[in-house]
Amino acid sequence: MSFSFQLEATCGAARAGRFLTPHGEVQTPVFMPVGTLATVKGVPQDVLEELGVQILLNNTYHLYLRPGVETIHHLGGVQKFMAWHKPILTDSGGFQVFSLSDLRKLTEDGVQFRSHLDGSLHFFSPETSLAAEIGLGADIIMAFDECTEFPATYERARQSMELTARWARRSHDYFQAHKREVPWFEEKTRQLGSEQTQALFGIVQGGMYPDLRRESAERTVAIGFSGHAIGGLSVGEPREKTWEIVNQTIPLLPADKPRYVMGVGTPEEIVEYVRLGVDMMDCVMPTRAARHGLLFTSQGKLNIKNARYARDDNPIDPNCRCKVCTRYSRAYLRHLYASQEVLAQVLNTVHNLAHYLDIMRRVRETIISGEFAIARPVS
């Protein structure tokens, strides 16, 4: 059984579906918390399970540098390494290499870069990036791409898009030749009575230019990936531009495969991306904001650092039933943050993740019931 996506219901362009991986089923639309270094900062895996997290995102670049692919491979793969028994998606590391603009050298072959940890020299190509992802053993892995910066001229965006298209073909070819080289993954699929391998997704680039996005989508889809992502967003462009690019690109992607928008967004935005037909999203916002005292609620954003909460015995969000809101007051959480207690960041993160995941659950339910509400698009 190869990777497949089953569409269950639609409501307008919004979709509810599911796909099966060797580590479990994922119901869509889905928000994937970011566990860059094989950890969602401050939140143990059992708490993630209690929250209903279906799938995590890990990053190949960071795990490649520390503790190293060989170490994780020797220990039985990233799921066993981090004691997480549900699906994982790994980013190829293209975005992280992009962020090292002062420490990298880009060629047709790949990217030479220096580690942000110790300055050591490394090289990622489509082949070596895929080798690392295959070695880590995640359920879904991403083709190696070049993330186009913002702003970028049309010519620069075209060159970058074309390079990504060539790298996509090389990523796919390498994957086809080496996708059965993860022994414990093969054992897991045999337990399920299937022959499923890891699933490889392609990435659409093209900067902020609709015609380049269209060409990138056509060339990426033609290769034959198991799913498709829209990359090169959240790189400094205005949010309305992000929405515009997603809106124009989603209809170009096959309806029978998962559609993934990388690196977005706020609670309001993720609902709007579902409305456009997006199935998968990830973003560091709920966890990063939590560490800085910014909490998301059904009534809007709440900055727990504010002195007005010093004697407030209300929960963060009276409409939230997460383990933080049912136990702790705003006053206590503000005290923890002001005292620089680690627990403040942990509890804030648990609440923000619960808020995002609850949104996705409600959205899925309303798509299936045909009651997904009409609202004003993000602008």
Image (spheres, helix red, strand yellow):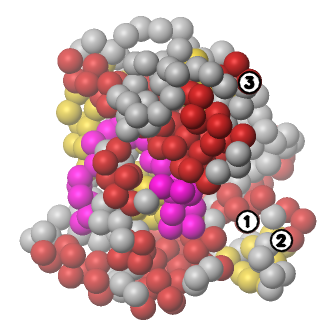
| Residue 354 lies in quadrant | top left
Q: Which residue: 31% across, 61% down? A: 86
Q: Furthest-left residue in view?
A: 193
* Distance (Cα) linking label 2 and label 3: 44 Å
Residue span colored magenta: 20-43
- For label 2, the residue is 104
* Distance (Cα) linking label 2 and label 1: 7 Å
Q: Could you tell me the amino acid type at mark 2?
A: Arg
Q: Could you tell me the amino acid type at mark 1?
A: Val
Secondary structure at badge 3 equals helix
| Residue 100 lies in quadrant | bottom right
- For label 3, the residue is 307
- For label 1, the residue is 97
Q: Could you tell me the amino acid type at mark 3?
A: Ala
- Given this view, does label 1 or label 3 mark the residue nearer the observer? 3
The percent coordinates of residue 375 (x first, y second) are: 47, 9
